[in-house]
Amino acid sequence: MTRSQRGGTPSRAARRPTRSSPSSNTGAGDTVDPTGKGSAKRARKSPKKRSGRRVPLRYLLPCVLLLALMAMLMLRGYVHSEILADHRVRPPVSNDRVPKDILKGGPVIDTRSERRRSLDVPDYELVLTFDDGPDPRWTPKVLDMLKKHDAKAVFFITGTMASRYPDLVQRMVDEGHEIGLHTFNHPDLSLQSKDRIDWELSQNQLALAGAAGIRTSLFRPPYSSFSERMDNRTWPVTQYIGSRGYITVVSDTDSQDWQRPGAAEIIRRSTPERGEGAIVLMHDSGGDRSQTVAALDRYIPQLQVKGYKFDTLTGALKAPSAHTPVTGLGLVKGKVWVTLVQVSERTTSVLVVALAVVGVLVLARFGLMLVLSLVHARRVRRRNFRWGPDGPVTEPVSVLVPAYNEAKCIEKTVRSLVASDHPIEVLVIDDGSSDGTAGIVEELGKDLPGVRVVRQLNAGKPAALNRGIANARHEIIVMMDGDTVFEPSTVRELVQPFADPRVGAVAGNAKVGNRDTLIGAWQHIEYVMGFNLDRRMYDILRCMPTIPGAVGAFRRTALERVGGMSEDTLAEDTDITMAMHRDGWHVVYAENARAWTEAPESVQQLWSQRYRWSYGTMQAIWKHRGSLFDRGPSGRFGRVGLPLVSLFMVVAPLLAPLIDVFLLYGLIFGPTEKTIGAWLGVLAVQVVCAALAFHLDKERMTHLISLPLQQLLYRQLMYVVLLQSWITALTGGRLRWQKLRRTGAVGLPGAPTEGAVPQQQSGERRPVG
């Protein structure tokens, strides 16, 4: 989720480190760690000169991770027959070109070295064959039955299943069974080219080599039946298979266990007449094989009593083993292949489970937001609602405006404050501006009462705010950014919650002023949906994570108790809010305290701003991690607020891009209709939440038209920014402060033209000097 608008006075740390704190507002050349403490030793080291231009790790690693994820997902789709699989089955054709001795011959067909012969299994020899495995559920049960009754069999495995379950293939070999190929993806080979047939065989052998270290000369085509049903399309395939060194094995006794006719019927269909030998077709994969397992437990001992022997194919034919050991490079390739498949399977399985868990939590959070936001709105909008027993707050307040190079915006900001209907003093703290910001305010102060300027060398926003607190004259202190404008009622609405002596800080309602562009409209949706519902929910739960830098108010006593604005993190507003909770103060949301701020108008500026926000939030969470184990209000915040912020602002968004990766995969390779339906369902939930937020905030619904596009594009940018913040934190990378370029175009809705002083009604404003 997003967090509240932070504006900003950047630090001169981008040019030189400050003396007060080595980690204050870290800039270029200053290393940032998650604790915000920095490293003096690292700072003393001069950067090494490097030849050439290197791609920073925080840019390279996200690309590598994305490519690795896509590769694993594609590999998983390949071995699950979702990619490159051909599920077509050709209907039978005539068999006039198939040799008669093949049609009337046995189920073992040898066309190697231009031979053309077929073989039958000797009398009282039964060769049990199992197709389509190995299956993790049914193959072990089949093997157990064979072991129980001392019977051998032939397993015709697919490469996809062998790659996923190599341990079962190894068990087959270890227990004396024979392995045959059943292609890799189980296509109808009569519809495939020779290149595709070769590929199916080689990939199947690769999987077998990786699983058991062998190769085999036995092959059974998918969708095969008896030799008498071979036709003009399957016979050429059989000949080609023989030219590649394989013996084709069909069957002459079909249990038809895939129909699940019952164990007794399976036994009847699998029993040959008059002591004849047979190759019996069964399955150990592809569906529910419980009847097959039950039938084996009765079938094998019944026929053993009649004198039948259950052997492998080569054992029954008294032929050399079909298995050949694989060594050297072939074995290495097989092992590497199986390892890659296993890594892909396990990684994607973990990610799917993680996404499912996060999805449930996110939907639960949406539900909680909807309920609690309605509860909050109903509570604060009651006619008889009062913040405290002493009535409305009318005492004057100090408004602090930290400013660094805000010449384009500062006049509108100051004039909007002077038009306030609550008694205020305006204190602009110029943080070493080089564009004449302080001079503009001084000129305004000549005509506008209650406006003062405090100058200081560039030391960063926290230092500027602390300087302002020291020079402020009143107990209630309002903080805002130099690029923000207030409505006349903003300050009055913002300070009313201080009628409750338990309230230490109040979050206002920051709104995007420049919402006419597409990127501005997306941020507008983000602010209204994310901040409106979030703050209402957090207010009810008493764990508000952030007082927005654009519009927030504090009790001076509370600020002094927690030590003022800290320079430990790049998110001083989140840091001070968490400190307030830990000190036992209530932090609430004033929905009518609206402030209009200028949001970034380019992707580069948006990236820079959100990168700092995300990184600063991580620092603040790390700094206040001790609250998890505290008692009282601090412990309550640590065990309620801190997990919520960590999960939904740091962890869950990091996994959210996976949703879009799986969405893209599902659209291309998976069940397209179900994928689109699922995405539309999630979008519908977001639309409902956004519509409620816009309704509560009295905003026009027209901007929600761009919500679907926002989910596809804008959201991805935020996720990549968060991932980059994670990488910076984990690798000790350097985070630069970047001053956002302001246009000064944001004003109040329906405000007079630039430079005009808003008209005030007599008696509405009492400037405080």
Image: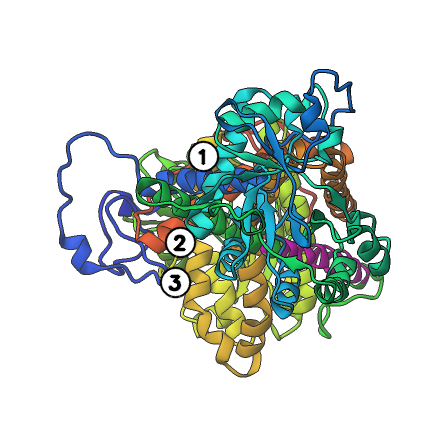
Q: Residue furthest top?
A: 97
Q: Nearer the viewer, mark 1 or mark 3?
A: 1
Q: Which residue is mark 1?
A: 605
Which residue in the protein does label 3 denote? 566
- Helix, strand or loop for disc 3: loop
Q: Is residue 603 left or right of residue 105?
A: left
Q: Amino acid at mark 2?
A: Leu
Q: Residue at x 37, y 54 (%)?
A: 729
Nearer the observer: mark 3 or 2; the answer is 2
Residue 445 visible? The answer is no
**Which residue in the rendered view is the most extreme toward the bottom?**
631
Residue 621, given in percent of the width and then of the height, sits at 46, 63
> Vertically, is 230 above or below 689?
above
Q: Which residue is mark 2?
A: 570
Q: Secondary structure at mark 1?
A: helix
Magenta stretch holds residue 366 = yes
Q: Bounds of the magenta span?
A: 354-378
Q: Residues within 10 Å of mark 3 (few under 14, many from 20)?
A: many
Task: Tell me the amino acid under the disc marked 3.
Answer: Ser
| N-term mark: 2 or 1 | 2
What amino acid type should be assigned to the residue bearing mark 1? Gln
Residue 295 quadrant: bottom right
Near-viewer residue (414 or 187): 187
The residue sitting at 71% across, 38% down in the picture is 675
Secondary structure beneath disc 2?
loop
Asked if the residues shown at circle 3 and circle 2 are in contact, with their CB atoms under 8 angstroms apart, the answer is no
